Amino acid sequence: MSNNVMIPMPLLRGIVNLLDYWDISKYDRAIQDDYRDILRELMVKMQKIELRDAYAKIISAKSPDQRDLARIQYLQLRNQVGDVGVVF
């Protein structure tokens, strides 16, 4: 069963930054694996939220030039989804 939860973006960013800061090298391998999986999923979630916002900028652009620039930024972000730099 999957339930969605609404978390304010500043809190999500703070959680990701805190998790990214922690050194878990002393813990059991299973904990390290869980930690990396969770951190990666949260980072990808943040990327997808940013991607959604970038898409909204395409839709709300007031000129063709703004739309083209927004589309370029959207495509750049889309190519980066999943590339979060979590070392495995």
Image (cartoon, helix red, strand yellow):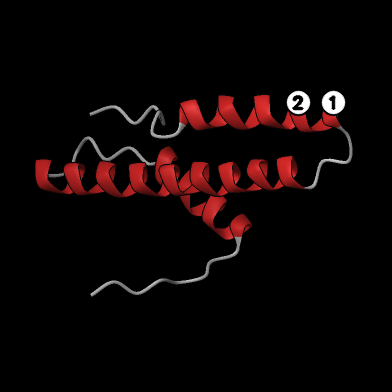
From the top left corner, tell me how far across and down residue 66 is, in percent: 83, 31
**Residue at the disc numbered 1:** 65
Q: Is residue 16 left or right of residue 38?
A: right
**Residue at the image point whose x is 38% and y is 34% from the top:** 82
Q: Quadrant of residue 69?
A: top right
Could you tell me which secondary element the residue under label 1 belongs to? helix
Q: Nearer the viewer, residue 64 or 78?
A: 64
Q: Split into 4 quadrants, where in the image is the N terminus?
A: bottom left
Q: Check residue 17 in the rendering and tell me which mark sits there, or answer none.
A: none
- Give the label, 1 or 2, closer to the camera: 1
**Residue at the image point whose x is 66% and y is 24% from the top:** 72
**Residue at the image point whose x is 55% and y is 49% from the top:** 49
From the top left corner, tell me how far across and down residue 35 is, in percent: 26, 47
From the top left corner, tell me how far across and down residue 29 is, in percent: 11, 40
Q: Split into 4 quadrants, where in the image is the C terminus?
A: top left
**Residue at the disc numbered 2:** 69
Q: Quadrant of residue 11?
A: bottom right
Label 1 is placed on what type of residue?
Answer: Asp
Q: Are marks 1 and 2 in contact (CB under 8 Å)?
A: yes
Could you tell me which secondary element the residue under label 2 belongs to? helix
Q: Residue furthest left?
A: 29
Q: Is residue 78 left or right of residue 70?
A: left
Q: Residue furthest front?
A: 64
11 relative to 38, above or below: below
Please state the total of marks drawn on the protein image: 2
**Residue at the image point whose x is 51% and y is 41% from the top:** 47
Q: Residues within 10 Å of mark 1 (few under 14, many from 20)?
A: few
Spatial CA span between label 1 and label 2:
6 Å
From the top left corner, tell me how far across and down residue 59 is, in percent: 73, 46
Label 2 is placed on what type of residue?
Answer: Leu
Q: Is residue 75 left or right of residue 42?
A: right
